[in-house]
Amino acid sequence: MTIRRIIQGRSPGRNILWGAALLLGILSLLFLGQNFLNLETATAPTAPQFIDPLQYQEQFKDRASHVLLDVRTPEEFASGHISGAVIISVETLASRLDEIPRDLPVVVYCRSGNRSATAAQILNGEGFQPVYDLGGIQAWVAQGLPIE
């Protein structure tokens, strides 16, 4: 029997060929889908976590166990910041990632919480883990916590 007769449908072998092609297609999709799902879960970073000032004080009593990152402008930083904070403005963060240790948790804050959320997403997207968003220094001050 020739391939031409099989393709033209003049042979019972045509059904076998179509069945085999269909089965191969289904198995390929399952395999690719399985690999995609495994790859996605294996590389998906944990989303940044919000942490309030009191939780921060409790969880990070030891200043050496994390990086506290102020993502405001230098002028804002000079007007008052949380003790132990390092300043890298959110505008320059992407170009200064090599200055941030990757083996420590990173806690970010700004004035009101908008820039810290952006910075936390940037850090998270670049593989920093874990990343905590402390929100704004306004909440810190409102709770009577000290600034320098």
Image (spheres, grey):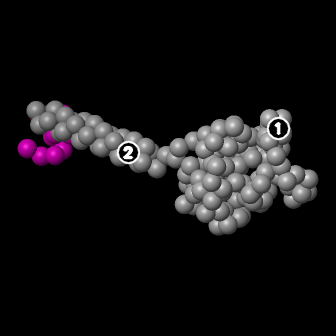
Q: Amino acid at mark 2?
A: Asn
For residue 6: magenta? yes
Q: Tell me where residue 31 sits by quadrant.
A: top left
**Residue 104 on image: x %, y %:** 57, 57
Q: Residue furthest bottom?
A: 98
Classed neighbour count for the residue bearing mark 2: other residues with Cα under 10 Å, few (<14), some (14–19), many (≥20): few
What segment carries the magenta color? Answer: 1-11
- Relative to residue 142, is residue 118 drawn left or right? left
Q: Quadrant of the C terminus?
A: bottom right
**Residue 6 on image: x %, y %:** 16, 40
**Residue 114 on image: x %, y %:** 78, 40
- Residue 79 appears in the picture as rendered: yes
* Closer to us: 118 or 32: 118
Q: Which residue is under mark 1?
A: 144
SS of the residue under disc 2:
helix
- Residue 90 appears in the picture as rendered: no
Instruction: Give the total number of marks visible in the rendering.
Output: 2
Q: Amino acid at mark 1?
A: Gly
**Point 37% across, 45% down: residue:** 38
**Point 22% across, 37% down: residue:** 23
- Relative to residue 112, is residue 48 drawn left or right? left
Dot label at residue 38: 2
For residue 129: magenta? no
Dot label at residue 53: none
Q: Quadrant of the N terminus?
A: top left
* Closer to us: 46 or 33: 46
Q: Tell me where residue 116 sits by quadrant.
A: top right
